[in-house]
Amino acid sequence: MSWKREHHRRWYLLGLLLVLSVLYTSLVPARDLPPIGFNDKLEHGTAYVLMMVWFGGLLPLRQYAWLVAGLLALGGGVEIAQWLMALGRTGEWLDFAADAGGVAAGLLLCLLGLRHWATWIERWWFGP
């Protein structure tokens, strides 16, 4: 499957915005977040599934180990930062476990075929 490089960069830019939004919502003081009403662990897992599938659709399969390691480092780093900061947030092992579960679920989705999402969209939008 070939890439149209001019569109490929846009996917990475959108992915960067996804990562920055996860970082922002993870590190902003708790009082500044709107109440969403979902389970906190479900929110963590969902964010990391989305990031895994997003970047899994952009990177070759041989780079998945680095992607998984990077996302786990991000999740762990956020929990350490929350623990160190006095902004009404607390670092929790269960949050990191939810992050890791999200990465694992996203990896499974990628391996089951969802890793081709960007190619599918590009072919649909721009043609073969």
Image: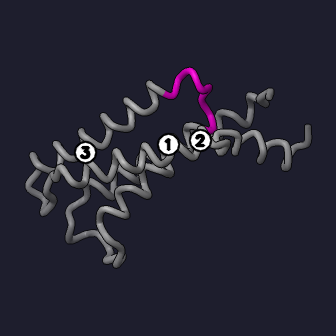
Disc 3 marks which amino acid?
Answer: Val
Q: Report which residue position mark 1 lands on.
A: 52
Which sits in the foreground, 56 or 110? 110
Image quarter hosting the C terminus: top right
Separation of marks 3 and 1 at Cα, in angstroms: 16 Å
Please indicate, yes or no, whether residue 58 appears anywhere in the rendered image: yes
3D distance between C-alphas at marks 1 and 2: 8 Å
Image coords of residue 49 (percent x, y):
47, 50
Q: Secondary structure at mark 2?
A: helix
The kind of residue on which mark 1 rests is: Met
Say above or below: 32 vs 81: below
Please tell me whether residue 88 is drawn above or below residue 38 in the rendered image. above
**Boundaries of the magenta span:** 57-64
Q: For residue 114, which quarter of the picture?
A: top right
Badge nearest the viewer, 1 or 2: 2
Instruction: Name the residue that disc number 3 marks.
Output: 78
